[in-house]
Image (tube, rainbow, N blue to C red):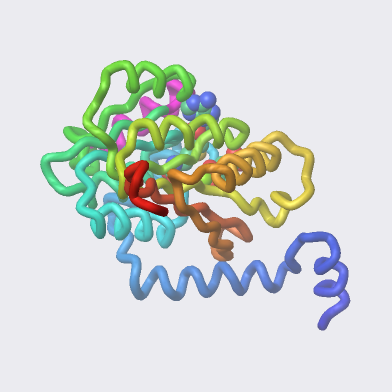
Amino acid sequence: MSNETIAAAGSGRPDRSEESTWAAVDEYFSAALVGEDDELAAVERAAEAAGLPPISVSAAQGKLLALLVRSIGARRVLEVGTLGGYSAVWMARAITRPGRLVTFELEPHHAEVARANVDRAGVGGLVDIRVGPAADGLRALLDERPEPFDFAFIDADKASNAVYLDYAVRLGRPGTLIVVDNVVRGGRVLHSADEASEGVRRLVDTLAGRADVDSVAVQTVGGRGYDGFILARINERRSPDSGH
Ligand code: SAH
Ligand code: DHB
Ligand code: MG
């Protein structure tokens, strides 16, 4: 082990050479398997040109979302945190038609960029971008009594993760999958007092206490560093006399 590796080990920070290996391996698999096309690359370029922060999911993560959406034949997808629409385009393409993706975004500028991006990518007809604080938007959506959502991707302000999870469950049905991004945060989830880490721990406590949702956390490394996601699934309802 290099001195740098030893120093990094106790700090929860990876050493630089490890990070560049993660990125290189991510690129290797992505180039071979992910198939990010020109339309998706254009979404990222447009977001960058518009000054949006470079915090969308990676190509591999986008592909994973698309595979999950397609695997369950999802027609209705909920997203919290649109940014420039990169994850939205991955998921919208994978939706079983006719379908709908409703996505919430706080920042009007992000929403504008995303609108142009989903339109250019040819999925604009499926995508409903709602601007404003997601908690308000989700409350309004619930009041519309919509058809249940089959899939949800939660990727906005991490402090509100538990609130968004609760809405996603209420807007879902037994079998609905819910993915929550950025739950590891370089290991900060364990002890850090920042708002985002607190929000992730609150989410984990909520999930641990819920009998109606089953879940797992998966740690990831790659071009976006060391992070991870939670995959949750709404359980079938148990009848009161089923004996379980
Ligand atoms: N899912 C996107 C990345 C989302 S980044 C992708 O992978 O392509 C997180 C986004 O959540 C940012 O655009 C941010 O403006 C938005 N956000 C932050 N707080 C929010 C809130 N309270 N309600 C809705 N969106 C919010
Ligand atoms: C941040 C948000 C994200 O959704 C992400 O994937 C990475 C970083 C952030 O707010 O810094
Ligand atoms: Mg994210």
Q: Residue at x 63, y 43 (%)?
A: 205
What residue occupies the far bottom of the structure in this picture?
A: 1
Q: Residue at x 35, y 75 (%)?
A: 32
Residue 243 at what x, y percent from top left? 38, 53
Q: Depth check: 121 or 71 in front?
A: 71
Q: Is residue 41 visible?
A: no
Q: In the drawing, does residue 200 fall left or right of residue 232? A: right
Magenta portion: prevailing SS class: helix
Where is 1 relative to 112, above or below?
Answer: below
What residue occupies the far left of the structure in this picture?
A: 98
Q: Depth check: 68 or 48 in front?
A: 68
Q: Specify the segment rendered in magenta.
A: 105-119
In the figure, residue 174 lies in which quadrant? top left
Residue 231 at what x, y percent from top left? 46, 53
Residue 92 at what x, y percent from top left? 25, 44
Q: Residue at x 33, y 21 (%)?
A: 141
Count of marks placed on residues = 0
